[in-house]
Every structure is written in C-alpha cells, then in structure tokens.
Image: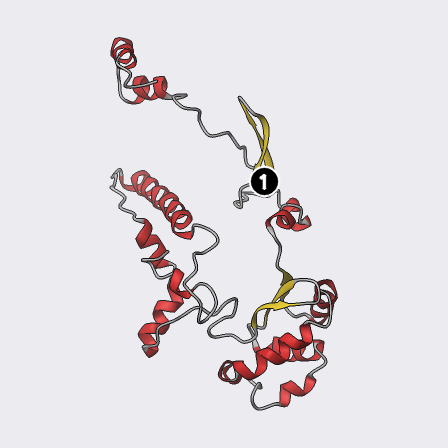
Amino acid sequence: QAMGGAMSVTGEEGRAPARMGLPMGDLAGGMFGAFAVAGALFRRERTGQGGVIDLSLLDAQVSLLTYLAQYFWTDGKVPGPMGSGHSSVVPYQALQTRDGYLIVAVFAEKFWGLFSRALGKSEWERDPRFATNADRVRNRQALIPLIEEIFKGRTTKEWLDTLHREGVPAAPIHQVDQVLVDPQVLLRKMVASLQHPNLGRLPTLGSPIKVDGHMEVPLAPPPQLGEHTQEILTKLLGYTQAQIDSLRGNGAIA
C-alpha cells in the first residue's frame, strides 16, 4: 500500500497518509493469482503448454491505481487523499446525518436534478455554479458544505427513504456487524458456515461467485498442520514409505 501509492490517496486532505482498512495488495494479489492459474490451465488445455506465473504484491497494488495513474499522465497533477469524496464526480461521498452516515453517488447528470429536488433545492439545477458535473467539481468547496448542513437535519433512514423515492443512488454506511445481518447479504448467501474437525461448526463468509444459479458453494476448513503430508509425498512426489518414515524420524516433517 505504501510503495504502490494507495496510502498516498487514502485518508483526509492535509492529514497523514492512512493505511487502507483492508489489505488490498494481499487480496488483489491472491485474486490475480487465481486468474493467472485459471488462464494457465486453459492455455494448457488448448495448447498442451505449461507456463511459469510471475506475480508480485507490488504489481497487484500498482495495477489498482487505474484511473489515478491516467489522471497523472493526462494533466501532471499528483492525486492526493480526498476523504470519501470522488476526484471527478460531485457529489459522490459520505455525508453525516442526524444519527449516522450514508453515501450518495450522483455519478450521472440525470441524478443531479433528482438529488436537488430530494433536498428541496431545485434551484440548484439552474445555478450556473452547479449546473453540470464539471461545474460542481470546480465549485466543490462551495457546494459540499451546503449539502452537509442539510443532511445533518434528518436521520439516515429518513434520508435514504427520500433519496430512494426520488431514484438517487444512496446507501447506508454499514459497520461489519451490520453487514453480516443485512437482508441482501443473507439473501445472496454471503454468510455461511463450515464444519471444523476440532472446533465444530464455524461461521464464515460465502463465495461471491454464483454459477448457474447455485447460491451456495461447498466450503471446507483449512487443512490442519501436516494433514496432507502423506498424500503429497506419496502421490505427487513419489516418496516411498521408508523415505517418509526417515523424514519423520529426523523431524523434517510432522
């Protein structure tokens, strides 16, 4: 995150760089690794050729810069932290309500009028400072404080009801415990369980990949220490039982 630029664009403007709440470099590296293995297997199936996969966590993190790198190459300006705001869309950020926070995403011009009317500020549609997204980006410092003040007057639920009724993209900002009981999360089977040989049944996250309508993917616990040693040494590496006994006797394997 530090070397790959992620920390430099995370956090609030004028504050110290912040680490992202999730280890995105590690997670992205794992996902890219899975993609690479799948691609290599497909290539082997089609051509009979194997391949050596070279993947680094830094490469994975740098690839996630996406449009931020393009912004820099286009105008030479170094991107920095913007809190929850978006560098090229306004308003697209978290907003504090009377009892919590929500996020709004006015990412298309058609939503600006709907958003303005939801706030009781239809005159903003005709205000030349805010008429287009480009105008709103230029005048972000004038617009956002006005929006923030309005949102503090009602609860998160009240605002979400109003915004959704008008068709404005908006969502609550859930904490982890709220995510795990969210109806949509449960409907999509993203909360599951697995049977552990020592600890019994444990809660775990489901798979986001649904294939042919199957919502539940068979889950297995992580292998215990040495669980597959015998199988790997004999079936994959061709060791004899005498060789395995020697390794075990020398303490090389459990």
Q: Label 1, on which residue?
A: 214
Please report the residue visible at 26 percent of the width from the left and 16 percent of the height from the top: 239
Q: Nearer the viewer, residue 252 or 234?
A: 252
Please indicate whether residue 218 sits to the left or right of residue 53 in the image.
right
Structural crowding at the residue carrying mark 1, measured as other residues with C-alpha within 10 Å and reported as few (<14), some (14–19) or many (≥20): few
Please report the residue visible at 33 percent of the width from the left and 58 percent of the height from the top: 4
Q: Nearer the viewer, residue 175 or 110?
A: 175
Please report the residue visible at 71 percent of the width from the left and 72 percent of the height from the top: 166
**Where residue 32 sits: x, y (%)?**
37, 48
Residue furthest top in the image: 242
**Where residue 134 sits: x, y (%)?**
50, 82
Look at the image and name its color scheme: secondary structure
Please report the residue visible at 26 percent of the width from the left and 37 percent of the height from the top: 48
| Residue 215, visible in the rendered structure | no
The quarter of the image holding the C terminus is: top left
**Where residue 13 sits: x, y (%)?**
46, 71
Q: Is residue 222 above or below residue 135?
A: above
Q: Please tell me in which quadrant of the rendered image residue 100 appears.
A: bottom right
SS of the residue at dot 1? loop
Q: Is residue 218 above or below residue 147?
A: above
| Residue 192, visible in the rendered structure | yes
**Where residue 26 sits: x, y (%)?**
39, 47
Please indicate whether residue 23 sits to the left or right of residue 194 in the image.
left
